Amino acid sequence: MSVAAHDLTGRLANANINPARGVIGVRLRLYNCTEMTRNSSPIYPTFAEAVERFRAFVREQGIDRDLVFVNDDDVVVLGKDWFVRSVDAASSRAVAREAYEAAVVRGLGVSLTGVCTVESAVGVHVYGPVDQDEAERLMYPNGLKLSLVTDLPKAMRLRWAPWVACRLRERLNPGAISRRTELLK
């Protein structure tokens, strides 16, 4: 049996139902409905606008801190311990802007996520899915996604030598790199 339901955009979503097993699968496509053009293509905000929206979103969650951008190469996660490489704020922002703009070009969605606290700031990671399959698996809308990890882990900022030691420990620990990569999506 097949049932049709409306998702938030008013488009039909199909659900396949087996009376003996219940719902087998539901396929929905999520959009940022407030920013649609006539041809259903989302309008992505500029990087600066996205950062301001994220800042407002974080404040709504009761966190009033500065933002610092972190990328995959800046973070090491060993068990429950988070470490962030000491980087220049301007260069980390430039790397985040490049990641944002690349995700906008792909058109599969882009996320600004608060992943940790770094001293008195929120560590923000910018990510865009690499293909349609990943976008669907991670439930990315074709637009801007803002998210904040509940109970933000505290990351320790490290200078060069301790950073290299942590990176080496991460590489010697099977699965640590893939875990970090998944945590930052």
Image (cartoon, rainbow, N blue to C red):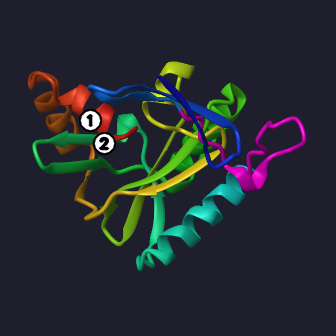
**For the residues marked 2 and 1, what is the alpha-carbon distance in whole angstroms?**
8 Å
Residue 128 placement (x, y as % from top left): 54, 34
Precedes in sequence: disc 2 or disc 1: 2
Provide the residue designation for mark 2: 75
Against 68, residue 46 (above or below) is: above
Does the magenta stretch mainly form a helix, a strand or a loop?
loop
Mark 2 vs 1: CB contact within 8 A = yes
Q: Is residue 81 visible?
A: yes
Query: Which residue reaches farthest right?
Result: 38
Indicate which disc residue 58 carries: none
Provide the residue designation for mark 1: 180
As drawn, is 55 to the left or to the right of 119? right
Residue 41 placement (x, y as % from top left): 80, 36
Residue at the image point whose x is 16% and y is 38% from the top: 166
Front residue (pair 66, 161): 66
Q: Which residues are magenta?
A: 28-45
Q: For the residue carrying disc 2, how many other residues have a C-alpha within 10 Å: few (<14), some (14-19), or many (20+)?
A: many
Name which quarter of the figure residue 157 lies in: bottom left
